[in-house]
Image: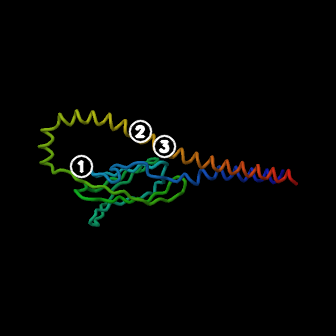
Amino acid sequence: MKKISILLFVATLFLFSANTVFAHTHLDSSNPEDGTTVTESIDTIELNFDTVIEQNATLQVESSEGDTFEVTDISITDGELVATLDEDLANGSYTVTWDIIGVDGHAMQDSITFEVDAESSEEEEIEESTTAEENESMTENNQSESDDSTTADETNEETATDSSSNTMIIAILLVAIIAIIAIVLIRKKK
């Protein structure tokens, strides 16, 4: 009976520690998003993580030509990191690299890439005056479609994450139950 109690204690301890092992910090979203083309000049980068991150995070922006852009301010609130650049990014390809530590103590380094393809100010003024009304109606339609799509994507991501966590817990419970049954059967034979 003492062996069964020890086995139950070890199985319970494993179940509770397994959940924290798989709970590393991950990037939820970014602005600009990874792999997208931005059509406006930008001077801020926003990264949203799935857990709280430490205040000592760093971020670097580099162009495809190897030029590094100075980050003048990094603001961290819970799982959100907002970096302000010294200047707007010109047209071109960029890589944003970050180094953070999650609340779980897990260090994470990763990067995203995006392109800037902003029109010059003269072209923007001409286009804005001729298409302002068209853009308003299209924006309203796209906004409602985008909101629906974003909600569906977020739900699918949450479901996938929850499903994999639940599957792992169920598998661990099944192994523990099978082990307990095997021990009881072995003891009964003696």
Q: Amino acid at mark 3?
A: Glu
**Label 1: element kind:** loop
How much space separates mark 1 and mark 3, taking CA atoms? Answer: 30 Å
Q: Earlier in the sequence, mark 1 or mark 3?
A: 1
Q: Position of residue 7 (x, y in %)?
A: 76, 53
Q: Badge 3 is on which residue?
A: 158
How much space separates mark 2 and mark 3, taking CA atoms? Answer: 10 Å
Q: Amino acid at mark 1?
A: Thr
The circle on residue 31 is none
Q: Earlier in the sequence, mark 2 or mark 1?
A: 1
Residue pushed farthest front?
A: 189
In the image, is residue 15 above or below residue 68?
above
Q: Badge 2 is on which residue?
A: 152
In the figure, is residue 40 to the left or right of 178?
left
Please tell me in which quadrant of the rendered image residue 110 appears.
bottom left
Residue at (46% x, 54% y) in the render: 55
How much space separates mark 2 and mark 1, taking CA atoms? Answer: 25 Å
Which-is-in-front pick, marks 2 and 1?
A: 2
Q: Position of residue 169 (x, y in %)?
A: 62, 48
Q: Nearer the viewer, residue 31 or 149?
A: 149
Q: Position of residue 39 (x, y in %)?
A: 23, 49
Q: Position of residue 54 (x, y in %)?
A: 48, 54
Which-is-in-front pick, marks 1 and 3?
A: 3
In the figure, is residue 16 to the left or right of 181?
left
Q: Badge 1 is on which residue?
A: 39
In the image, is residue 74 above or below residue 136?
below
